[in-house]
Amino acid sequence: MKKILYTFGLCAGLAMQAKAQTVSMDADIRPRFEYRHGYGALLPEGADPAAFVTQRSRLNVNYADSKLKIHLSVQDVSTWGDTRQLAINDENNSFSLFQAWLGYAFSENWSMKLGRQTLSYDDQRMLGEVDWTMQGRFHDAAMLTFSKSGFKTDLAFAFNQESQRNEGSGYGINGMFSYKVMQMLHAKKTWEKASFSFLFMNNGFQKFTEDATPLPDGVYYRQTTGAYFTFPLSALTLTGSAYLQTGKSTPTADLNAYQYMLEARYRLGKVALMAGFESLSGSDQVSDSKEKSFFPLYGTNHKFNGYMDLFYVGNHANNVGLNDGYFTALVPTGKSSNLSAQVHFFSANAELRDGQSKYLGSELDLIFSKTIAKNIKMNAGYSQFFDTGSMAAIKGGVQAAKTQNWGWVQLIVTPTLFKHSWEEK
């Protein structure tokens, strides 16, 4: 903690000495109450629901001049009550460094960014900040950017290690698709209202021997390649994407998977209507010899496939895939508030064993949003999932409770604490 605060002070001091253009500091405080009765996984019959309050307390510091940019972000992510009131230290290890990067502009068109940073592109299906989670998602990477006349290309590289060693380079952190190496290319062309982008990402994961004491045994790779577009037609806007995943899903399993999505948005006065369909390929439970399960590795998956996060949010990997047809209506309820209603119809993309139906269930999501004051917003949501026997079967055969629902209320406070500019000499 002391080291991080010292770093903040040092950066601010250097900024003033260098006559920096701008130095700013802002906060992001968001407490959230949740009642979970089937969120993330089907609640078994007879099980008790969960309820808690979690909170993000994030502090951001920014420095920028004509060439150099620095961003530092620290945060505490805690559940109310998880630390003793008189504890002398942070017992839950909740304090962390979220971002710490420097950017430098070589010229008008070329720049670079080094350090801990977020990668967020397009609709965030493949790469996103995952802002719904209190902790967010970051990447330790180097980025080279070219930008000119509505065209922007980002080229990122990463090489991860667990510690500073004198011997060996095995990387044993494998949770949530943590990679050892990564190369990423994102190219986007923007017109007046339309855009088209291309993504290629190559992720390398550490492979280990199958001995009693596993040892590093090379790296296996997964590639994600595809495109995303938005195209407006008067009051109608079309959005779509298509991606392929190839390479290896495990050290020994070949991967051949796909995703595609098409969505139409229509504005009817002040009401916004949206209808779409997304398909993510899966593997048959009986006959497939190759892995065909697509997984959106580093996206903000909470945005997609229902807010109860039953698909692709730390789950549903190497499974039967998903077909998701959905409809959304966004209705203003006042000058500073609105209500969103979304319905999803889910089915498996691949065949289930024993001739089970592909229909997995449906979900209703309601979200109310209101701006209370400058930099203060309140969101509240309620979701209900209507499951089927097939859904219970692919989720481990649990005997599900008759009601699967989830409710939450969140306050988001994002004030600017300090901002000052100096003229360069």
Image (cartoon, helix red, strand yellow):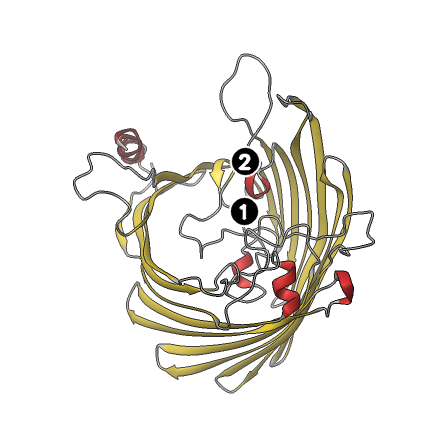
Tag on residue 119? Answer: 1
- Drawn side of residue 345 relative to residue 37, left or right: right
Residue type marked 1: Leu
Residue 32's x, y, as percent? Answer: 34, 60
Q: Quadrant of residue 332?
A: bottom left
Give SS at disc 1: loop
- Drawn side of residue 165 relative to residue 381, left or right: right
Q: Is residue 135 above or below residue 182?
A: below
- Drawn side of residue 411 relative to residue 273, left or right: left
Q: Residues within 10 Å of mark 1 (few under 14, many from 20)?
A: many
- Drawn side of residue 373 relative to residue 379, left or right: left
Q: Which residue occupies the extreme top position in the image?
A: 166
Is residue 71 at all visible to an observer of this figure?
no
Residue 233's x, y, as percent? Answer: 66, 77
Q: Residue at x 50, y 45 (%)?
A: 118
Q: Residues within 10 Å of mark 2 (few under 14, many from 20)?
A: many
Q: Is residue 376 above or below residue 26?
A: below
Residue corresponding to mark 2: 141
Residue type marked 2: Ala
Q: Residue at x 37, y 77 (%)?
A: 337
- Tag 1 or tag 2, which sits nearer the N-term? 1
Q: Quadrant of the C terminus?
A: top left
